[in-house]
Image (cartoon, grey):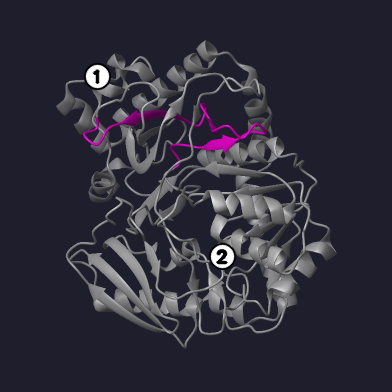
Amino acid sequence: MSLKSIYLRAPAPLQAVFLNAVALRIRAHRYGPAYRRAVRQALQRESWDRSALREFQDHRLRSIIDHAYGKSTYYRMVFDESGVHPRDVTGVADLSRLPLLTKEVLRENLADILTAPRPRSGWLHGHTSGTTGSPLSLWYDRETAILNNAMDQRQKAWGGMADPDWIGLFLGQIIVSPQRHRPPFWQPNYVLRQVWFSTFHLSDENLPDYIEEIRRRGLRFLEGYPSTLFILAKHLLETGERLPMRSVFTSSETLHRIQRETIEEAFQCRIFDFYGHAERVIFATECDRHEGKHLSEEYGYTEVVDHQGEPVAPGTLGYLVGTSLENRAMPMIRYRTGDLSRIIEEPCPCGRTSRRIVDVSTKAEDIVVTPDGRLLSPSILTHPFKPFDQIRKSQIIQEAVDRIVVRLVPSDQFDTAQEEALKAGLRERLGEGVMIDVQRVGDIPREASGKYRWVISKVDHAAKLSWGVDQ
């Protein structure tokens, strides 16, 4: 029996002990003096002028380039084939001399991109489902994890949250068994001052318990996927309630206008939306003016290109390309995302000097409803897919409340055992009463609008969005 199975079968008090033990290990590895120093430096850099920020980026980039060329078989080959020597890249202005790194190239050359023959002690392993539902295996070093946490804390500070404050999290981790029918549907993390709320029990019957627990703990900050917090917010409005917060933080999905308006009305505060991803190349956060997202310039350098990979004119919409200025485990140089945005060059009224991007357009998705009335965010359904690099594309279609069709574009290495493991992961989240039909297909086309809908629900429910109108 796995540790995960033992945890889910344990009584709530024992689960709390296990959760906080894991949090102690995380705090030792990713927080501490180095983290606090990174937060202080990040706050200081807010007022740096553009030339100082660019000088900092150029210095960091030269260091990353030298390291990648010396330690990564893939990057040595790329530089040599491009006729570019590391000394030719004096700063971010020279990046366009190098080819883009696509998700497909990254997947095919993973071992050669790493800067060591095998992952080293202290490296962290991550996954992403990506904008087409195709998982990707990733590695980053401890310093990158610390910097990522520092960028997140700076965003929290912009929203008025200080270190001693507690926050309620509505993310994708399985905190309690999805088969549990009575509260608690949450667990406190005393080490990091977080309350983890299960996002697998958000039914009309259970939502009042969530609201009561948030009130009982006096939480003033919440963070979660937009679609998940939308479920809670809509319930509050429909019952004539409000749950005042200082700030709400959202990420991981496109925040649609109707979601922002509903969440802000229900929680009586502004949303601070932020953009980041598992590839750790771009981190962008909303300030209190809410006029675009500030790029974390010390985290990575961001470019915008057209569909052919050519840089676009300033202020033009295009695909975001990011270069990590920290990750030495798996350097990501000119990584082309599938996300669309444009850079705002004008200074923000808040006084911070970093460039900004407009709201990012990614995949459009629906919420899934289970036979027992739970509403599940699409983001939490990505987790069963993440271990399988052999899946090129995927799509979930809810044909009925008790039937899910999973369309897969797999590689030749995706076998029956992996398919059964994927179905088991989905069944764990959806419940045993849902039939899961896996269909292997040659490709999954986009919508006529050009959007890629990873989850399509044909079942009506209270939190359903209409993609036929401006959201």
Other residues around mark 2 within 10 Å, as few (<14) / some (14–19) / many (≥20): some
Write down the residue under mark 2. 173
User: For this rendering, which residue is in front, 441 or 134?
Assistant: 441
With 237 as the anchor, is 415 left or right in this view? left
Label for residue 85?
1
Q: Quadrant of residue 215?
A: bottom right
> Is residue 378 in the magenta section?
no
Q: Give x and y (percent) for residue 170.
A: 62, 61
Q: Secondary structure at mark 2?
A: loop
Q: Residue at x 75, y 54 (%)?
A: 193
Three-letter amino acid code of the residue under disc 1: His
* Main SS category, magenta section: loop
Residue 312 visible within the image: yes
Q: Give x and y (percent) for residue 113.
A: 30, 41
With 339 as the anchor, is 290 left or right in this view? right
Other residues around mark 1 within 10 Å, as few (<14) / some (14–19) / many (≥20): few
Q: Quadrant of residue 64?
A: top left
Q: Give x and y (percent) for residue 339.
A: 38, 43
Specify the segment rendered in magenta: 280-309
